[in-house]
């Protein structure tokens, strides 16, 4: 578990990245850290890209419906103006931000802020997602969280898309994506067919 660093005489802020596949608990971990900062009486603000409108306009919501208020912004540059007087800056769904984000969060850290960034490390093709690889390179602390593979129960690192949609950004929930381990991810839709057969068999048995 991540424990907040406690350096006496800390002269700058720092960057933490929480990454992983879908259903890995990234947002829950972000919310956990922000709640702890609030308990410590620190001024906390949360931001998310405007593109993510699955839930309420101004909320960061994890899959377990733990919700906190977040400000949607369309450009990472806006963070510079919106974080005056804020000591802990939370950023959710960072993979959807523009490529300036790593530079902007470094400026925030340089100004003494603690920046906690959560996002998908890989897209559904298994490729590094948007600004995430660059954020991982410049962060002081990285936490990779894992989901559980729905097919074999091993640790899941990949987000497998069940639909045939080709665009990189398809927002969705359990009906659109599955968390899979490396092996099951590469088995592709053979696994979908197997589970459909299982359901069919179950129906026949009844
Ligand atoms: Zn698996």
Image (spheres, grey):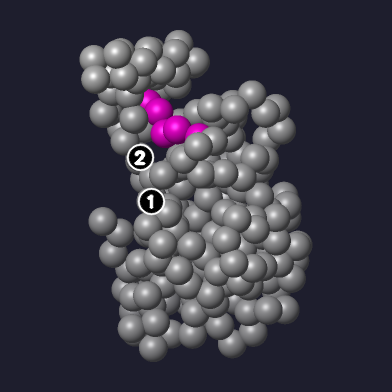
- Of all residues, the one furthest to the front in this rendering is 206
Instruction: Relative to 125, say whether 81 is above or below.
Output: below
How many marks overall?
A: 2
| Residue at x 28%, y 23% (from the top left corner) | 152
Disc 2: which residue? 147
Determine which quarter of the picture holds residue 147: top left
| x and y percentages locating residue 73 in the rendered image | 71, 67
Instruction: Relative to 44, say whether 128 is above or below.
Output: above
Q: CA distance from mark 2 to mark 1?
A: 7 Å
The answer as to whether callout 1 falls within 8 Å of ligand 1 is no
| Residue at x 60%, y 55% (from the top left corner) | 54
Task: Give the secondary structure at mark 1.
Answer: loop
Whether tag 2 and tag 1 are in contact, CB under 8 A, the answer is yes
| x and y percentages locating residue 94 in the rendered image | 59, 54
Q: Is residue 54 magenta?
A: no
Task: Give the secondary structure at mark 2.
Answer: strand
Whether residue 67 sits left or right of residue 126 in the image: it is left
Instruction: Relative to 191, say whether 124 is above or below.
Output: below
Residue extent of the magenta highlight:
177-181
């Amino acid at each position: 578990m991540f424990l907040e660093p406690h350096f006496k005489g800390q002269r700058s802020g720092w960057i933490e990245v929480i990454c992983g596949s879908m259903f890995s608990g990234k947002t829950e971990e972000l919310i956990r850290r922000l709640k702890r900062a609030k308990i410590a009486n620190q001024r906390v603000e949360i931001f998310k890209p405007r593109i993510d409108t699955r839930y309420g306009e101004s909320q960061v919501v994890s899959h377990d419906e733990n919700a906190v208020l977040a400000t949607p912004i369309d450009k990472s540059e806006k963070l510079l103006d919106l974080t005056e007087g804020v000591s802990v800056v939370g950023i959710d769904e960072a993979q959807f931000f523009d490529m300036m984000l790593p530079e902007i969060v470094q400026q925030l850290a340089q100004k003494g802020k603690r920046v906690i960034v959560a996002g998908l490390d890989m897209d559904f093709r298994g490729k590094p997602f948007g600004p995430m690889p660059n954020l991982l390179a410049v962060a002081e602390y990285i936490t990779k969280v894992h989901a559980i593979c729905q097919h074999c129960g091993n640790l899941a690192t990949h987000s497998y898309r069940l639909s045939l949609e080709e665009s990189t950004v398809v927002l969705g929930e359990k009906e659109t994506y599955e968390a899979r381990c490396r092996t099951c991810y590469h088995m592709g839709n053979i696994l979908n067919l197997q589970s459909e057969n299982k359901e069919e068999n179950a129906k026949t048995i009844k």
